Amino acid sequence: MIGILAQGGSGPVIPDFGGGGAGNSCVRDNGFFCWNWFQQNWSDTFQPRLIEHIELTVVALAIGFVISFAAALFAYRYKWFDFPFTTFSAFLYTIPSLALFQVLVGITGLTLATALIPLVTYTLLILFRNTLIGLQEVPDEVREAARGMGLTRRQILWRVELPLALPAILAGLQIAAVTVVSLATVAAFVYDHGLGSPIFDAINRGTFKTELIGAGGLAILLGIASYAFFAVIQRVATPWARYRRA
Amino acid sequence: MTSLDTAHDEGPSARSGASGGTAAEIVFDSVTKRYAGQEQPAVDNLSLTIGAGEICMLVGPSGAGKTTALKLINRLIDFEEGDITIDGRGVRGENVTALRRGIGYVIQQTGLFPHMTIAANIATVPRLLRWDKQRIRARIDELLELVGLEPEYAKRYPAQLSGGQRQRVGLARALAADPPVMLMDEPFGALDPITRGRLQEEFLRLHARVSKTVVFVTHDIDEAIKMGDRVCVLRQGGRLAQYDPPDVLLARPVDEFVADFVGADRGLKRLSLRRVGDLHLLPAPSARAGEDGTAARARVAEVGYETLILVDDDGRPQGMIGRDSLNGPVNASDARSIGVFGRLDMPLRDALSVMLSQAGSHLVVVDDDGRLAGLVSADLISAELAGTDASARAFDADEVPT
Ligand SMILES: Nc1ncnc2c1ncn2[C@@H]1O[C@H](COP(=O)(O)OP(=O)(O)OP(=O)(O)O)[C@@H](O)[C@H]1O
Ligand SMILES: [Mg+2]
């Protein structure tokens, strides 16, 4: 395990705490948070790691959404599919992430795929359930009025049912995004990528506080930002939902 | 404003041209609908002709198959036995989406799309029919006005409207592409009595402007009588009990079931179908102030009345004077107040009610300008009911069974 952790060790160039290479007493004393050091390492460590983290999140979320969305549409049409898919995705959700990453190393190696697969699997349950419930909760009379006016099945799905399910779908994406941002730090355990890398690096070096707090703090901020992002999307994309009656 | 009546040229369905107007005749020919796994049919051997431009009210107890019968027309429910034709074309032979785009559909819960503005809701069928933007916009304005909503409602969402306003939008949406046929399933059923009454009247006014064949489901017999050209009473099991104009239904229910259904007060209900102006009013002896009282008194006596109506120079009633006070010139100071006048557009039921509350045997009726038009008596009203009952019988005899 330590061996794997060391894989992620291409962190920033920092001196051992005893030396004074950076000429910075804060770093030497492993102070709570050395702002100077953080700034010095922003452009070659934190910023690229942050971008990687965002990329990882977006890709995992996108793949998870495509799978869940297709599965939810299928389950909406063919009700029998709901139970097996829900059970399957709930089962995946229960697997401890660290264990799943570890198991996958044996199959897909220390690759991007090994990092992505668990992230994707953790989005399935919430995205599938929310999309399906959003569709199922479209009021019957709305569906009937649409049919009565001569909309085709497909038109009803795309013009009526999916727009009405959008708040539920976006709420699912919001939760899934925050989950993935958080889990993606653990993914650095198997694939040297994202904000998890400097975190593991800091731990490897005897818990270098500035690096740990800097990367961890960025991960938290990214989680909050993704939450806020979907809140804004929700507001802009579904202005009507504000007036919905209780 | 462009009139709706002229908008039919580009109606959604080819059939709009067929009848030379926007309305179409609907014929049920021995239609039976049995839901899967049910012993009793929901609609049983129903045959019925709804004339173009007529309002046909479908009534009956809950579960009698009203909604089912309605949804067979636009094929929201499929059927195998019998046929339904619209202007001679079987609904089952048509492309189902094209058929529905040519039929307005209004339901009690409105079914408005919550995520679309009122304008977008109304534009639903025109968009499906690929009308151009300008035409759709003009049509939205026109329809909002037609159903009595201010133009600024166009930008609102359904949740921002009251129940009555939503129902108006539902109506506008169903009318959008000017369909020859409208199907309405208890459209006003969820509204308070005042809003319902107002919408009923507005719908009738609107129907007079846009010629449409309307099939209207209700469980409210008063609504059926008020709105219908004909009322179709269904009994349990989807069997036709009676199909007649409201007055005939009230005057001569075919059996106990229909009599019960229309209610014990059906005589009074018939009174609300007629207005004072429909009666041949009794002549009212009248005189102006200063006229010769003796001559006036003779005129009153001639028709066997006790009182004279005092009118002003324009013929507007000012009061009434007892026969015995008519000595010498007619004197305005002898006049008593008349009380509430009857009006020509007053339903007979209201006229009778006023008469009873004033404890008088006659009601003084004025025309739209307030001038004396004549008198109504209780006898006149009951004679009218008896007379039209006879004509109802004649109507029955004339009718060729279909
Ligand atoms: N989808 C369905 N499947 C099976 N049976 C049905 C279905 N819809 C209606 N029925 C039955 O058919 C009969 C007629 O129902 P329908 O809805 O047409 O009645 P209705 O006259 O509209 O009643 P209400 O006044 O309560 O609306 C009822 O016995 C009902 O239980
Ligand atoms: Mg019904």
Image (spheres, coloured by chain):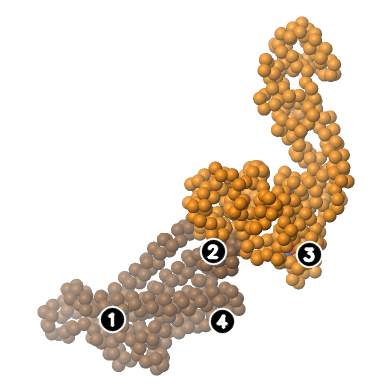
Chain colours: A brown, B orange
| Amino acid type at mark 2 | Val
* Quadrant in which residue B299 is drawn: top right
Near-viewer residue (B262 or B124): B124
Residue carrying label 2: A160
Tag 1's secondary structure? Answer: helix
Work out which quarter of the rendered image holds the C terminus of chain B and state it.
bottom right
Nearer to us of marks 2 and 1 is 2
| Amino acid type at mark 3 | Gly
Q: Residues within 10 Å of mark 4 (few under 14, many from 20)?
A: few
Q: Residues within 10 Å of mark 1 (few under 14, many from 20)?
A: many
Near-viewer residue (A3 or B331): B331
The disc at residue B82 is: 3
Residue carrying label 1: A199
B37 shown above or below A242: below
Q: Residues within 10 Å of mark 3 (few under 14, many from 20)?
A: some
Which chain contains the residue that carries disc 4?
Answer: A
Q: Position of residue B258 (x, y in %)?
A: 82, 50
Cα distance, mark 1 to mark 4? 38 Å
Give left or right: position of B85 versus A174: right
Q: Residue at x 60, y 78 (%)?
A: A80
| Amino acid type at mark 1 | Ile
Residue under disc 4 on the same chain as residue under disc 3? no
Kindly indicate whether the residue at mark 4 contacts the one at mark 1 (C-beta within 8 angstroms): no
